[in-house]
Amino acid sequence: MAHQGQTQGAAIYLVLGLLLGGGAAAQAAELALTGVAEDSELYATLRGGSLLAEQTDQDEDAEPATPQELVAAAQADYGRLLALLYDNGYFGPTLKITLDGVDASAIPAVQPPRRIDRAVITVDPGPKFRFGLTRIAPVAPETELPDGFATGETASLGVLKETVSTGISGWRAVGHAKAELAEQDLTAKHRERLIDADLRLAPGPKLRFGALTVTGNEDVRTQRLLEIAGLPEGEVFSPEELDLATERLRRTGAFDAVALIEADRIGPNNTLPITAQITEAPKRRLGFGAELSSLEGLTLSTFWLHRNLLGGAERLRLSAEIEGIGGNSGGEDYTLSARFERPATFNEDTNFYALATLEQLDEVNYFSRQLDLEAGIERIANENRTYSAGLGLRVAETEDAFGTNNYTLLTLPLGAEFDYRDKELDATEGYYIDASIMPFVAVSGSASGLRTYFDARYYRTFGTERPVTLAFRGQLGSVAGPDLSEAPADYLFYSGGGGSVRGQPYQSLGVDLASGDTVGGRSFAGVSAEARVKLTEKIGVVGFADAGYIGSEEFYDGSGTWHSGAGLGLRYATGIGPIRLDVAVPTSGPEVDEDFQVYIGIGQAF
């Protein structure tokens, strides 16, 4: 009986061990690629394009590929590797793939072996071919063919496809929408190891845009869809205009899907009819948000959005926010706002907007309540450049070291945005400029003047294995016209905190008065620099330094005060942007009580 109990106990432990992963780990299969020198570029290309290599080169912690997965990968590799060889100029290769000595093509995918230990890819690339005669005609003016399509270059199948595509695109760009490859003559000269390529294009007639037909719309009026798309009926066909019309419809936010499809047949008088197939998005949306910050405390927000208010893809957004609950950046801030937008007003690239905002700000050095009413236009010059102009009315009551001020202003906000970054939340190349100029006329309680703000950012990345991105930012601000004591308190500038100088407390730098109180400055300057090092696909580290300046003068003259901070940060990449953790200390400027500041957020600091 004792012996039986011990056997049952051993069996139980064995089962538990297997369930908990205590049994022998499955052994990953090994892969050998032979016939090509391991230090060659071709070896790296073939291994990098092999599904079998992808299955066998997994991390130690990853689950080994199953025999069925290995068989499927090996059989798919025949086509993939042959395509890579052709693309590199090898048009007479032999290829064999074995799994434990058995040809992979002979193994039934539905009945794989129980175990596969070794895979071998054997390649005999054969001679490398180069282009001999190369010709493509006719070609549209100013068409730039690929450099690889030339005598003496590697006879790449990919280059041939790119050459044909470039030639057709060149004709389409000048109105020949139905351009196509009419004939191709490829001759292999095996003794000379040359490929002669003679390609003939058929441009077809020059076409003009025909009528735009809309399908799929239910609530958005067809006439408004035509106005928003702005497709120039009667003008010469242009792929850029087609893409632009598609983008105009998409950026309204009223549609889940938009596709502009060219007709298969040419219409009367060499016109090309276009069909817009759309799927409308749900008209209404309700959202909530919550954020927690060690500095600003808890922020609660909500919004209600209507995407098609009047049947013309108009947007109405109502939102509310409470910020600073339990924070250290003053008191609690309250905002209620409504914004209406009408696309394609005046023309297809100019939108109309109207907004109303009721706001209370309880900041460190001032308190304000204000009502803003504004209407204006937004001009979208292209996907990178936007301009705006508006006319507004501001009624406000502010309290700061100078006392209480009630004022009414007429404003003329003007803005320009240039966004040439590769990614908004994690830029590695490009630049960004945001400039605003706002003349204001005092109806009561202040003096007329001009508020300006300029923000410029530049990004450059070096290296590939562990890339380093250098990021720079410069900011300038000014309030000209009213004296410091008469200027609207919420128009003045402060420095310190995550948006300006990390390491310095929030809005810690202003203009110190003789009374010992602090108010905002009429001039502001800020500079920041970061070195972002990517350690792995997900993890990066950042070193940064910030500096800020506040002066009582209208424009920077150096008579004010600078302060600075520096620190280190950690980044973890996510699908929406990197999670940011920065720790910074003050390095110069007025003495502060805190030794360091911590900042957490989504996206890079700038």
Image (tube, helix red, strand yellow):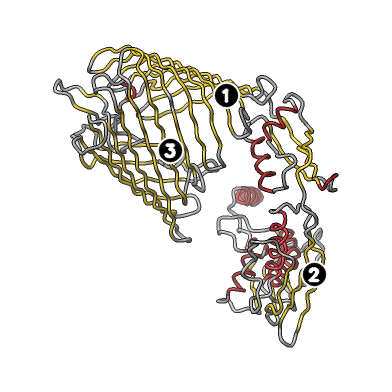
Residue depicted at x 47% and y 54%: 536
Which residue is labeled 3 in the image?
434
> Where is residue 166 drawn, in percent x and y?
68, 61
Q: CA distance from mark 3 to mark 2?
A: 51 Å
Residue depicted at x 27% and y 29% = 522
Q: Assess disc 3: are there few (<14), some (14-19) or many (≥20) residues with their C-alpha within 10 Å of its C-alpha.
A: some
Q: Earlier in the sequence, mark 3 or mark 2?
A: 2
Query: Label 1's element?
Result: strand
C-alpha distance separating marks 1 and 3: 28 Å
Label 2 environment density (alpha carbons within 10 Å; few <14, some 14–19, many ≥20): few
User: Which of the two residues, 274 or 204, is positioned nearer the viewer here?
Assistant: 204
- The residue tagged 2 is 184
- The amino acid beneath tag 1 is Gly
Q: Which x, y percent locates residue 411?
A: 41, 22
Q: Residue 567 appears in which quarter of the rendering?
A: top left
Mark closer to the observer (1, 2): 2
User: Residue at image x 63%, y 24%?
Assistant: 314
Checking the image for residue 287, the label placed there is 1
Name the mark on residue 463: none
